Image: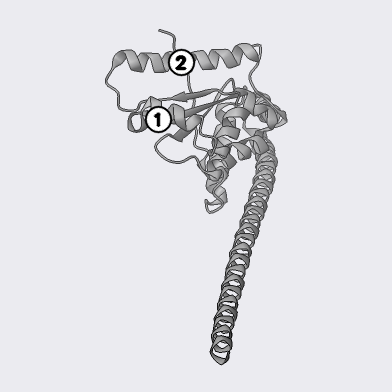
């Protein structure tokens, strides 16, 4: 059976603005360090047992903002807890037209989506799941002609490592007399990378806050419009009832007058 070396990292802090910035920076730095030679495939893992929310969709958007639009060409959506929902229910969920956020996300990722059964004891099923995952990764690699995803930030990380290695060799040659220069240079490079990461994350969080505010305002306008429609319908009903009552009074008066006319005659 084939084997893949899979490096995993947590990206939950990218959308959660309540997570400490320091913790988010550590996770991003770990991600960049582990994948500094580029990313062949990125697995975005969600639970099939819970509803796919706008926040889940925004996680994909956050990744695109941070890494660039082309990162979706390397994404695979993986849904876990398949043992709770079952494959048939999951298939219906994927085609549910009301699940707009899920539909848009699947389309953005090129319909690359897998379901994993977390608690299956069927070795054939477990083997099939892994084969499907490997096939999806192979498809991405082939489609991208074997080239991993990379951007300017990855290039900067590689430059940092290359520079650090060069400095290390030079420092060893210059012995301990140049150690302070080496440390100062490394600290300066690390500071530059950290400042760039800080700026990117702050910009990302600000954009997400603005999008959330815009979404809330749109929902508020919809609620106000619906409330106004209900009030107009109630007013029309009241006018109709008043008209009916006036008509009844006129009819009663006419019948009474007619009776009186007959009596006089």
Identify the residue at horizontal 55%, vertical 89% (top origin): 260
From this viewpoint, which residue is outermost toward the top? Answer: 1
Find the residue positioned furthest to the front: 265
Q: CA distance from mark 2 to mark 1?
A: 19 Å
Residue 141 percent coordinates (x, y): 60, 14
Q: Nearer the viewer, mark 2 or mark 1?
A: 1
Which residue in the structure is indicated by mark 1?
89
Residue 91 position, x and y percent, is: 45, 27
Q: Is residue 111 above or below residue 141?
A: below
- Give the side of residue 192 with respect to residue 79, left or right: right
Which quadrant of the view contains residue 26? top right
Vertically, is 118 above or below 132?
below
Q: Is residue 134 visible?
A: yes
Q: Secondary structure at mark 1?
A: helix
Please provide percent x and percent y for residue 124.
32, 12
Of 54 and 252, nearer the camera is 252
Q: Does residue 162 sit above or below 219 in this rendering?
A: above
Crowdedness of circle 1 by 10 Å Cα count: few (<14), some, many (20+)?
A: few
Quadrant where the image shows the N terminus: top left
Percent of width and height locating residue 228? 63, 65
3 left or right, relative to 102: left
Q: Is residue 136 shown left or right of residue 218?
A: left
Q: Which mark is residue 132?
A: 2
């Amino acid at each position: 059976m084939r084997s893949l070396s899979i490096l995993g990292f947590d990206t939950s802090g990218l959308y959660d603005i309540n997570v400490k910035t320091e913790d988010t920076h550590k996770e991003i730095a770990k991600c960049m360090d582990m994948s500094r030679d580029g990313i062949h495939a990125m697995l975005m893992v969600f639970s099939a047992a819970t509803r796919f929310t706008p926040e889940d969709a925004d996680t994909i958007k956050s990744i695109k903002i941070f890494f660039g639009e082309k990162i979706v060409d390397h994404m695979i959506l993986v849904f876990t807890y398949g043992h709770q929902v079952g494959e048939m229910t999951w298939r219906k969920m994927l085609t549910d037209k009301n699940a707009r956020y899920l539909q848009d996300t699947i389309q953005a990722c090129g319909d690359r989506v897998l379901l994993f059964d977390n608690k299956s004891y069927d070795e054939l099923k477990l083997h099939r799941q892994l084969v499907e995952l490997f096939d999806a990764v192979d498809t991405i690699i082939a489609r991208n002609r074997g080239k991993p995803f990379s951007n300017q930030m990855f290039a900067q990380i590689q430059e940092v490592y290359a520079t650090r290695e060069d400095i290390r060799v030079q420092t060893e040659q210059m012995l301990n007399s140049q150690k302070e220069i080496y440390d100062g240079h490394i600290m300066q490079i690390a500071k530059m990378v950290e400042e760039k990461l800080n700026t990117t994350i702050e910009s990302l969080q600000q954009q997400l806050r603005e999008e959330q505010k815009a979404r809330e305002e749109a929902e508020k306008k919809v609620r106000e419009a619906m409330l106004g429609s209900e009030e107009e319908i109630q007013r029309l009903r009241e006018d109709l009832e008043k008209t009916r009552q006036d008509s009844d009074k006129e009819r009663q008066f006419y019948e009474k007058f007619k009776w009186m006319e007959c009596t006089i005659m």
